[in-house]
Amino acid sequence: MSDLAPLLQRFFTDKLDGQMNASVHTKAAYADTFRLLLLYAQHRTGTAPSALRLADLNADMVGRFLQHLEDERGNSASTRNARRAALRSFFTYASYRAPEAIATISQVLAIPAKRTKTTIVSFLTRAEAEALIAAPDTATWIGRRDRLLLHLGIQTGLRVSELAGLRVGDIENGPHSQLRCLGKGRKHRVIPLQKPTIRLLTAWLNELDGIPATPLFPTSTGTALSRAAIAKLLARHVQVASEQCPSLGEKNVTPHTLRHTCAMMLLHAGIDTASIALWLGHATIQTTQAYLQADLELKRRSLDRLPAIGDRPPARYQASDALIAFLTDR
């Protein structure tokens, strides 16, 4: 076995598990990055992944791999940068445990991130959101599950992983109904629920077994819906809803669009960005500022307060001669 294999294994066990206590999603993303890199290196060198040396993963190899992600796999620059971040984390770890390879490691760490375009967040209007929620056929068990999922996603702004991870025990029904979730960065959030959401939840909970560990959104076999399954059912209902609301068919609606829709509804209701950041579980308020950029209605209201270009400015008040004389005599 080469020097790379044990070093990479220790990176996952010592750093990600032991030091960082990284989430399952983080470890899966890191593992996927290295799987792609090692298979790419195998294709280029003819060496099996377990036999690759740290020196084989030099700056030229890593740079070509990152370009391969864009050119051949069709990944965006943002995805490329995320893969690069995972590689940097490993090579930083390796710099302390393989000092003899510091020249190779330093060159890899010097690979810059690729600049990306900042896009305006996509969200649903109220009419589009209502059409989407009404799309599932509630005469079926799956339709009732899907309608609640779409409704809850828009009302709470949960991430798709948070929706998929909800359990029956996370719902608290009572005078102040709310749900609890463990979100990104292992942050716990408690989100209050509106009356229409409570009615749907109460009816749905009566169809489940009531065991706290039961997934709130199960498959027909009882396991929790995956993120891919949620994306698939969303696409299906968007297609149905587009027949009643054609503007939906012009948008790329993903599970994260539901989260953006919740944020925009809060913004339109006059909620300040600091409160929205707490609601959505953002690490910093700067993340929430993106919704201000996307809010065209807010921009229109700001524009209405400005005089139009080319309009004559209002005439200044001209005092009468008698008043000027009065003031002059003071």
Image (cartoon, helix red, strand yellow):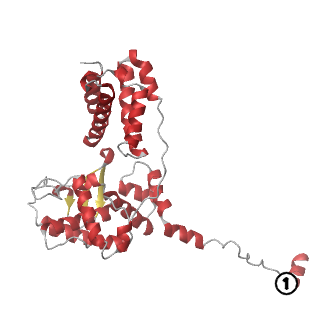
Residue at horizontal 48 percent and vertical 29 percent from the top:
110
Query: Which residue occupies the extreme top position in the image?
Result: 100
> Is residue 165 visible in this depiction of the protein?
no
Viewport quadrant of the N terminus = top left
**Along the line of sight, the residue nearer the viewer: 194 or 127:** 127
Helix, strand or loop status at disc 1: loop
**Along the line of sight, the residue nearer the viewer: 321 or 72:** 72
Residue at horizontal 25 percent and vertical 41 percent from the top:
24
Residue at horizontal 57 percent and vertical 69 percent from the top:
302
User: Which amino acid type is shown beneath numbered disc 1?
Assistant: Ser
Left or right: where 23 falls relative to 144 = right
Residue 322 image position (x, y, % from top left)? 88, 85
**Along the line of sight, the residue nearer the viewer: 244 or 176:** 244
Left or right: where 236 falls relative to 270 = left
Residue 293 image position (x, y, % from top left)? 50, 60
Q: Quadrant of residue 212?
A: bottom left
**Which residue does the numbered mark 1 point to in the structure image?**
320
Q: Quadrant of residue 35?
A: top left
Up/down of 252 relative to 322, above or below: above
